[in-house]
């Protein structure tokens, strides 16, 4: 067993390093939706999603971008704009299915703040969270801290946007007490169906989801190819798997997805990231100070950061500067002008690489 554990690569892989550069910004402004301005200019992949998901004939789309890339905003803003344009119309206009209740609850809070902070949406658009867990004091009205969670309130007055999970949606289609949820839906009321973290629905669970979606469309008599379906995932869709992924999502949703349906992230290159940062620091840590690079040589994070700043920039970082918390941005700016960091970014080339490969390639540069 000891020999197996010691053999390189037999059980433990890595370590690996990845430095992801910023997402590429879109060409438009933060006011893509005039009634619902965003707080910041959208990324390129968000803008591409907006162009597909909003309009007279929105098209089914897969948003396959990384964690922290704003996947939720990619489909949420088109849905909110649609609901605003149809404010006053009764019935559920969008359903968002989450794989876990905790994720649904977290996104519900984000949705509540987007709606509350926009005077056009507040009081005109409603959203409800319908999951199995019961709160001690379920919300009967929306505010900045949350959306409607009281089940009876949602039955009496169905929300514009319904957040749920696929098991609960199954109950909502068969339980007699939940019939009022759907009574205000005409043939073309439900426009958007979103499945978040689509990669979790594989195998038998994917088959269950496909059957559930078909039952939902039959129940609401949704016209063929009317529903705009959206799937999101941070792990789906390499270029080699494009055809298989399109076939898979078409089977799950029972709707056509065109060849351009997969939205992938676009990040700036290392050259673009460094173009305004001329090299100003070229020194490397001397051989006799290598041990000072090791984190275990320090008792806490603060000591480690201050020591590394001295090693790489030959300049002291004052403790008071560290305590201010502004050192993050300052250090980031300085690193971009360091020869070693610039070489490291070029060697990584936006990929995830193991240490052996990185060390081999960076020795040629350094």
Image (spheres, grey):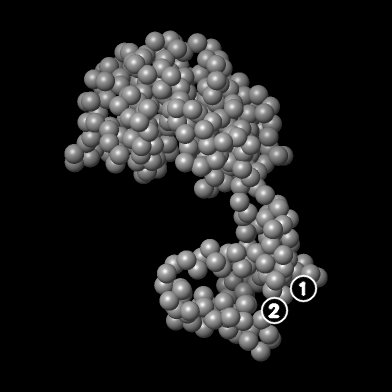
Residue occupied by mark 2: 284
Say the numbered circle drawn on residue 354. none
Q: How many marks?
A: 2
Most foreground residue, 74 or 42? 42
Most foreground residue, 323 or 208? 323
Q: Position of residue 333 (x, y in %)?
A: 60, 64
Question: Regarding mark 1 in the picture, which secondary structure is present there?
Answer: loop
Most foreground residue, 268 or 243? 268
68, above or below 279, in the image: above
Mark 2 vs mark 1, CA separation in Å: 9 Å
Q: Are marks 2 and 1 in contact (CB under 8 Å)?
A: yes
Q: Is residue 229 left or right of residue 154?
A: right
Residue occupied by mark 1: 366
Badge 1 density bin: few <14, some 14–19, many ≥20, Cα 10 Å: few
Q: Position of residue 7 (x, y in %)?
A: 65, 72
Residue 298, can we see it? yes
Question: Regarding mark 2 in the picture, which secondary structure is present there?
Answer: loop
Q: Position of residue 192 (x, y in %)?
A: 47, 23
Q: Is residue 244 left or right of residue 229?
A: right
């Amino acid at each position: 067993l000891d020999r197996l554990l010691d053999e390189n690569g037999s059980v433990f892989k890595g370590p690996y390093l990845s430095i992801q550069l910023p997402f590429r910004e879109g060409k438009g402004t933060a006011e893509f939706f005039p009634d619902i301005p965003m707080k910041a200019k959208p990324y390129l992949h968000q803008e591409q999603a907006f162009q597909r998901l909003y309009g007279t004939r929105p098209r089914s789309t897969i948003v396959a971008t990384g964690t922290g890339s704003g996947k939720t905003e990619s489909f949420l803003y088109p849905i909110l704009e649609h609901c605003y344009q149809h404010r006053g119309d009764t019935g559920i206009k969008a359903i968002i299915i989450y794989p876990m209740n905790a994720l649904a609850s977290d996104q519900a809070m984000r949705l509540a703040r987007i709606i509350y902070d926009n005077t056009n949406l507040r009081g005109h658009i409603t959203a409800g969270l319908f999951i199995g867990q019961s709160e001690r004091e379920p919300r009967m009205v929306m505010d900045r801290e949350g959306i409607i969670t009281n089940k009876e309130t949602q039955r009496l007055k169905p929300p514009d946007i319904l957040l749920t999970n696929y098991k609960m949606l199954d109950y909502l289609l068969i339980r007699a007490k939940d019939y009022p949820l759907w009574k205000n839906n005409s043939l073309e009321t439900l426009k958007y169906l979103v499945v978040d973290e689509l990669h979790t629905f594989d195998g038998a669970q994917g088959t269950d989801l496909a059957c559930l979606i078909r039952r939902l469309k039959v129940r609401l008599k949704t016209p063929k190819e009317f529903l705009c379906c959206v799937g999101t995932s941070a792990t789906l869709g390499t270029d080699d798997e494009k055809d298989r992924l399109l076939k898979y999502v078409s089977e799950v949703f029972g709707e056509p997805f065109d060849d351009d349906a997969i939205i992938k992230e676009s990040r700036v290159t290392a050259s673009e990231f460094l173009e305004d940062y001329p090299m100003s620091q070229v020194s490397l840590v001397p051989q006799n100070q290598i041990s000072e690079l090791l984190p275990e040589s320090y008792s806490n994070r603060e000591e480690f950061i201050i020591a590394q700043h001295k090693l790489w920039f030959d300049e002291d970082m004052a403790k008071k500067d560290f305590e201010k918390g502004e050192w993050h941005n300052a250090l980031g700016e300085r690193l971009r002008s360091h020869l070693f960091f610039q070489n490291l970014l070029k060697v990584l080339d936006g990929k995830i690489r193991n240490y052996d490969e990185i060390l081999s390639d960076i020795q040629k540069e350094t």
